[in-house]
Amino acid sequence: MEFSSYILEDFQIKYFAERLKEIAKNDFGGVGKLAEKIGLTNLSPYTAKNPKEPMTRLLYRFASVGIDINYLLTGEIILKKEDFEERFSLLEARILELEAENYRNIKRIEKLSENELKLTKEKEALESDKEVLLSQVVTLNKNACTKALKGQ
């Protein structure tokens, strides 16, 4: 469909009205304040339950106060180069934070692995000591029994 013959469908106009109310509330403090800002007494014909289709002059007025007309009409956001650069910078900074966190986590895991190895060696040493002590206890018990039998 060519743009020149494009007419907004009813559901598109309703979404337009919803987006208009959302933008008015979030960016201008309400529909009344937005109307005032663009030199109209009210915008109710465009925000009603069955809203009126916006005309070019109205769209121009919205654009003049910084409203993204593409978003208003379609719900799609088209980012500008500056937006991409800003988002890229934010993502780059977040990546650096995550890399630093990842490095710290790797070091923690290495430390835990070292501690686990130490504990395993200590456990093996204790098991060995336990066997030696049990062997000594058995020997002492034998000696004590032998002495007790001899002493009878």
Image: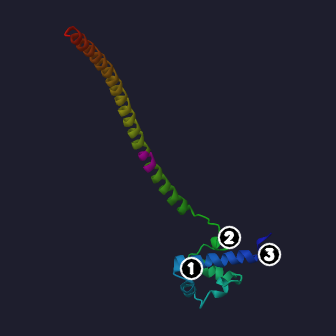
Instruction: Provide residue 70's location: percent of width, then percent of height.
Output: 65, 71
Disc count in the image? 3
Amino acid carrying mark 2 in the image: Thr
Tag shown at residue 24: 1
Q: Residue at (67%, 76%) from the top-left corner?
A: 16
Which residue is outermost to the bottom? 41
- SS label for mark 3: helix
Q: CB under 8 Å between callouts 2 and 3?
A: no
Q: Which of the two labelled residues, at mark 2 and mark 3, occupies the earlier sequence position? A: 3
Question: Where, by quadrant of the figure, is residue 41 drawn?
Answer: bottom right
Q: For this rendering, which residue is in front, 62 or 73? A: 73
Q: In terms of depth relative to the viewer, which is nearer, 52 or 111?
A: 111
Q: Which residues are magenta?
A: 97-101
Q: Amino acid at mark 3?
A: Ser
Question: Cα distance, mark 2 to mark 3?
Answer: 17 Å
Checking the image for residue 5, the label placed there is 3
